[in-house]
Amino acid sequence: MIWILAGLGALGIALALVLNAFQSNLVFFFTPTQIANGEAPQGRAFRLGGLVEPGSLRREGDGTVVAFRVTDSAKTVEVTYRGILPDLFKEGRGVVAQGTVEPDGSFRASEVLAKHDENYMPPEAAEALERAGKPVGAPSEFVDKASKSLK
């Protein structure tokens, strides 16, 4: 009986450690509207998705610091990023940025991911853009194809 209880205890400890590691590495996805409504976590990394607002891209300093706005057609979030943007990064296209919200409400990205072709958008971003209306600068078939991938 002691061996069974010890085995169950060890199994419980192992399960708790695995779940704790999973929870600490879990990265959530939020839209600009959710960030504006205060639904995004403060002081914790998460992913922001939407479209890069046309005309919003600015390079600062030596060109490795960039600022741009991400929109879901309802709300917009200012994003700053230090690093080299992906080759497929363009205004009016889908983007997912990982980082944290600053106290002023802007988003400091540690990683920026651009969509890999004209037919792809992260399902969460497509769903959020569809709920908010047609995305800015993207053809309607772009959202239709992305939303079909959700079903």
Image (cartoon, rainbow, N blue to C red):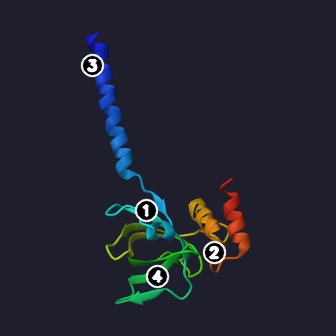
The answer to whether mark 1 and mark 3 are in CB contact below 8 A is no
User: In the rendered structure, which amino acid carries the disc numbered 4?
Assistant: Phe
The residue under label 3 is: 6
The answer to whether mark 3 and mark 2 are in CB contact below 8 A is no
Q: Which mark is residue 135?
A: 2
Q: Which residue is painted at 59% across and 80% down in the image?
A: 92
C-alpha distance separating marks 4 and 3: 56 Å
User: In the rendered structure, which amino acid carries the disc numbered 1?
Assistant: Glu
Left or right of 90 in this view: 141: right
| Quadrant in the picture for residue 7 | top left
Q: Secondary structure at mark 4?
A: strand
The residue under label 4 is: 68
| Residue 62 percent across, percent down from the top left | 35, 89
Q: Secondary structure at mark 3?
A: helix
| Residue 81 percent across, percent down from the top left | 39, 77
C-alpha distance separating marks 1 and 4: 21 Å
The residue under label 1 is: 39
The answer to whether mark 1 and mark 4 are in CB contact below 8 A is no
N-term-proximal mark, 1 vs 4: 1
User: In the rendered structure, which amino acid carries the disc numbered 3?
Assistant: Ala
Q: Residues within 10 Å of mark 4 (few under 14, many from 20)?
A: many
Comparing 37 with 117, the one in front is 37
Q: Tell us which disc is closer to us: 1 or 3.
A: 1
Q: Residues within 10 Å of mark 3 (few under 14, many from 20)?
A: few
